[in-house]
């Protein structure tokens, strides 16, 4: 994980309270049995449950049009729009990922999405709340490196390489995950 941009500081308390009131959609993967879920802000469907991408992980999504969901203009999510305005790129999917306390996502890659493999898109992570006990791991061949991610910083994660994350904290972690089209 590589920090690439420090964001303007903002108060996320109202937004986090709102997020806690929402039903998140379980992420279907073999790398965690339960405790990892998401909502869509922008993606391949107009509902917050439309977290998948066409042709990836058995998605039944047929549209190839990128659409903002009903959450995009929620006043409680204004801090998210402020974050997105600071990223100088065009967005593909924009999701909020929730990792429950005590949950581990095992070592994996996201090579199943060929747009990462061919360099068309990259993934940024922005931690929205920090309990001090969420650790990301990345691998360079056999060497594992741990990363603690601070709020208000955009991190680039090479999802074609192996990575994992553990929430050893007592609270759920919310992360803004933004897939962007590569530009200069």
Image (spheres, rainbow, N blue to C red):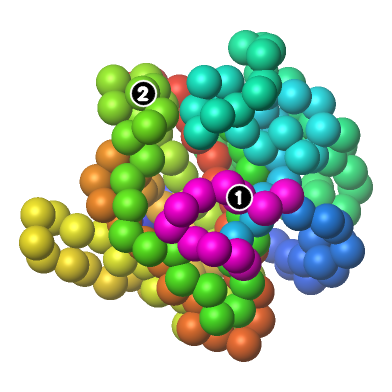
58 over 155 or under it: above or below: above
From the image, which quarter does the C terminus lie in? top left
Secondary structure beneath disc 1? loop
Residue 122: x and y in percent read 39, 34
Question: Mark number for residue 177?
Answer: none
Main secondary structure of the magenta stretch: loop
Magenta-tinted stretch: 25-35
Tell me: residue 92, above or below residue 37.
Answer: above
Q: Which residue is more in the foreground, 119 or 99?
A: 99
The residue at which mark 2 appears reads as 114
* Mark sitting earlier along the chain (2/1): 1
Q: Is residue 180 visible?
A: yes
For the point 64% across and 43% down, the residue is: 95
Q: Residue furthest left?
A: 142
Q: Which quadrant holds the N terminus?
A: bottom left
Classify 86 as above or below 17.
Answer: above
Q: Is residue 34 magenta?
A: yes
Q: Residue at x 51, y 33 (%)?
A: 57
Sort mark 2 into few (<14), some (14-19) or many (20+) by Cα contacts within 10 Å: some
The disc label shown at residue 27, or none: 1
Determine crowd level at label 1: few under 14, some 14-19, many 20+ residues with C-alpha closer than 10 A: some
Examine the rendering and report whether any part of residue 14 can be seen: no
Q: Position of residue 50 (x, y in %)?
A: 72, 34
User: Is residue 135 highlighted in magenta?
Assistant: no
Which quadrant holds residue 90?
top right
């Amino acid at each position: 994980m590589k920090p690439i941009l420090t964001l303007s500081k903002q108060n996320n308390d109202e937004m986090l309270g709102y997020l806690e009131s929402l039903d998140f959609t379980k992420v279907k993967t073999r790398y965690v049995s339960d405790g990892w879920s998401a909502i869509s802000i922008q993606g391949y469907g107009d509902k917050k449950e439309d977290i998948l991408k066409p042709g990836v992980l058995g998605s039944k999504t047929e549209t190839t049009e990128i659409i903002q969901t009903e959450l995009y203009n929620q006043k409680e999510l204004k801090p998210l729009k402020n974050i997105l305005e600071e990223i100088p790129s065009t967005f593909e999917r924009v999701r909020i990922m929730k990792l429950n306390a005590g949950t581990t996502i095992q070592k994996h890659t996201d090579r199943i999405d060929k747009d990462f493999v061919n360099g068309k898109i990259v993934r940024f992570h922005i931690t929205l709340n920090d309990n001090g006990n969420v650790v990301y791991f990345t691998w360079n061949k056999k060497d594992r490196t741990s990363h603690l991610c601070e709020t208000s910083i955009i991190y680039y994660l090479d999802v074609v390489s192996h990575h994992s994350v553990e929430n050893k904290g007592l609270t759920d972690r919310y992360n803004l995950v933004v897939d962007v089209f590569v530009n200069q």
